[in-house]
């Protein structure tokens, strides 16, 4: 058996309404001055109101930072760190999608240490300590509540990751009631992002293992069977809970068996054109699955059988083909732009995007098939 290490968030609370009883979790971690990291959209959706009121009522001092921006720019992260220091925070709560949770992770870390942010991009470079950290996802997407990763946009429009076990939150609170109001397009984009996490974890070349495989399969089953319902009937409580759980399981999987070419190709789209992370992934997904097909046939066949029992007896070649076709059909049904061109990407930018994608070697090494610069360019052309 191949040896492996598996790490995840030590406490996961899954309960509808749990966000309104957050004070118990905060107090259990010894927090008295909580710093809530969120964005304007979450605030305007009224999602922070009940948790903040409950914390205040329990005698916990609360400071809300709601200036997080999508694909958090370095400057905003540093602004949040400064605000947490000024507030004398002794606990950080990320409340929102991946952008808020990723910012919260770095606030918890950098509020306690003088290490410059620019020095900790990469794997394992951060030193502790950090403040206690609770994550409350309000989208079913990134799985950031169970990953040791924070993704930041640098001043040169590059998306860089800080990867460190220090960034694994102490507690993840999964309250699917918070996700009932996510608009259809954001539900679709974030849901496809989570599906890509499951697929790329399952085919991850270096660190794939028995635990990540089990989580990825279950995640994809939950996500694939619920995403259409969640997109068309946002108030469907069961579908929303299944999506949230699916996203978390996919996060646990890819935190240990990292994502690959779809993400490597997606990041430059976020950095240069500010496409939402999930949309960037969705736009590159079908082309990349086809590109990988010959190298990941057995794995794609297994994923195909997991989401479609009719493929139980099919041979690997046809099950894998059917899997790619099913995912492509699902993406094509989603309510968002269906090509790079339709999403506002310019054709002249494709060579720059390809060059930037090649900088994501941290991710490309996990892809089942090697990706050269010419391949990256061709994949962008196919998706254009
Ligand atoms: N840390 C990780 O492991 C990891 C993994 C994948 C992606 N990411 C990063 O996460 C970020 C993307 O996160 P995301 O896709 O969750 O999007 P996001 O956090 O940027 O949020 C997208 C939009 O949804 C809104 N929103 C969130 N919750 C809502 C709710 N309940 N109701 C109504 N509106 C709501 C927000 O206000 C925002 O406008 C990117 O920066 C990406 O690089 C991190
Ligand atoms: Fe992602």
Image: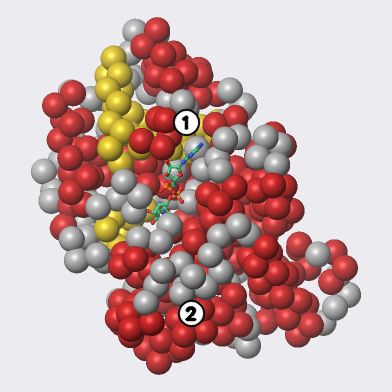
Percent x, y for residue 350?
36, 82
Closer to the camera in the image, 52 or 9:
52
- The residue lying at 76 percent from left, 76 percent from top is 322
Q: Which residue is mark 1?
A: 45
| SS category of the residue bearing label 2 | loop
Distance, label 2 to label 1, CA atoms, is 34 Å
Percent x, y for residue 233?
70, 42
Sequence-first tag of 2 and 1: 1
Residue 247 in sight here: no
Colour scheme in use: secondary structure
Q: Quadrant of residue 269?
A: bottom left
Q: Which mark is residue 384?
A: 2
Percent x, y for residue 377?
41, 86
Q: In the rendered view, does 56 fall on the left or right side of 138?
A: left
Category of crowding for the residue at label 1, using alpha-carbon neighbours closer than 10 angstroms: few (below 14), some (14–19), many (at least 20): few
Residue 113 in sight here: yes
| SS category of the residue bearing label 1 | loop
Closer to the camera in the image, 384 or 365:
384
């Amino acid at each position: 058996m191949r040896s492996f290490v598996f790490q995840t968030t030590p406490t996961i609370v899954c309960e509808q309404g749990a966000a309104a009883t957050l004070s118990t979790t905060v107090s259990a971690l010894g927090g008295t001055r909580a710093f809530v990291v969120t964005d304007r959209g979450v605030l305007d959706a009224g999602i922070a109101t009940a948790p903040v009121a409950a914390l205040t009522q329990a005698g916990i001092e609360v400071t809300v930072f709601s200036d997080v921006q999508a694909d958090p720019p370095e400057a905003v992260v540093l602004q949040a760190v400064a605000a947490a220091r000024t507030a004398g925070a002794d606990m950080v709560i990320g409340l929102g999608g991946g952008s808020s949770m990723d910012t919260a992770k770095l606030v918890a870390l950098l509020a306690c240490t003088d290490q410059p942010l620019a020095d900790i991009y990469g794997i394992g470079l951060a030193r502790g300590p950090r403040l206690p950290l609770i994550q409350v996802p309000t989208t079913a997407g990134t799985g950031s509540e169970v990953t040791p990763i924070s993704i930041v946009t640098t001043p040169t429009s590059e998306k860089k990751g800080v990867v460190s076990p220090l960034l694994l939150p102490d507690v993840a609170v999964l309250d699917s009631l918070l996700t009932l109001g996510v608009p259809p397009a954001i539900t679709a984009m974030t849901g496809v992002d989570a599906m890509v996490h499951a697929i790329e974890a399952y085919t991850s070349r270096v660190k794939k293992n028995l635990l990540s495989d089990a989580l990825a399969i279950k995640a994809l089953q939950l996500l694939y069977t619920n995403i259409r319902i969640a997109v068309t009937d946002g108030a469907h409580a069961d579908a929303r809970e299944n999506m949230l759980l699916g996203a978390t399981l996919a996060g646990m999987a890819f935190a240990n068996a990292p994502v690959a070419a779809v993400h490597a190709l997606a990041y430059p789209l976020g950095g240069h054109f500010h496409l939402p992370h999930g949309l960037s992934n969705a736009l590159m997904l079908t082309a990349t699955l086809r590109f990988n097909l010959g190298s990941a046939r057995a794995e794609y066949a297994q994923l195909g059988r997991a989401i479609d029992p009719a493929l139980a007896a099919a041979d690997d070649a046809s099950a894998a083909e059917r899997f790619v076709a099913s995912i492509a059909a699902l993406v094509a049904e989603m309510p968002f732009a269906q090509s790079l061109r339709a999403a506002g990407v310019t054709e002249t930018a494709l060579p720059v995007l390809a060059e930037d994608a090649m900088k994501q070697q941290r991710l490309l090494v996990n892809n089942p098939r090697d990706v050269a610069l010419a391949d990256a360019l061709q994949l962008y052309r196919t998706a254009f």
